[in-house]
Image: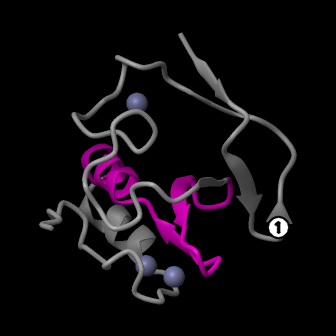
Amino acid sequence: MSERHPEISIYGASGPVDGVLVTHEVGECLLAHCAIHSPSQHPLASAPLRWRSDLLILERVCPHGIGHPDADGLDHVFVVDGEMAAAVLAVHTCDGCCGSAPPGGVFVD
Ligand SMILES: [Zn+2]
Ligand SMILES: [Zn+2]
Ligand SMILES: [Zn+2]
């Protein structure tokens, strides 16, 4: 089954992309923490989500408009595609809002 997310914007390499993100449903998350359904505790857990259609990862957009790879999204990549893939996707222009936790890392507040 699938679930539509009109509230999540979609961005490609050259800007906004038309379309609606479709994901798995509540209860069908691969991991205990899911960026969409049950975010872990991280600094941008309540920031708006944005799907990067060019990178195939969810970002959190901080109050300054910077897109940070979602921590739970990175964990998902880590589990599905491996450490190297997650490390590559973790690289981003960061203003510090996401805390830059490494893939598989744990946030402590
Ligand atoms: Zn989920
Ligand atoms: Zn910021
Ligand atoms: Zn960041």
From the viewer's perspective, is 109 left or right of 31? Answer: left
Q: Would residue 78 be counted in the magenta stretch? A: yes
In the rendered image, residue 99, in percent from the top left (x then y), is placed at: 31, 79
**Mark count:** 1
Q: Residues within 10 Å of mark 1 (few under 14, many from 20)?
A: few
- The span picked out in magenta is 53-81
Q: Would residue 64 be counted in the magenta stretch? A: yes
Q: Which residue is identified by label 1?
A: 15
Q: Residue furthest right?
A: 18
Q: Nearer the viewer, residue 14 or 35?
A: 35
Q: Quadrant of ligand 1?
A: top left
Does mark 1 have its CB less than 8 Å from ligand 2?
no
Q: Secondary structure at mark 1?
A: strand
From the viewer's perspective, is 59 left or right of 65? Answer: left
Q: Is residue 15 above or below residue 24?
A: below
- Residue drawn at x 52%, y 55% as measured from the top left: 57
- Residue drawn at x 75%, y 69% as measured from the top left: 13
Say which quarter of the image contains residue 52: bottom right
Q: Residue furthest top?
A: 1
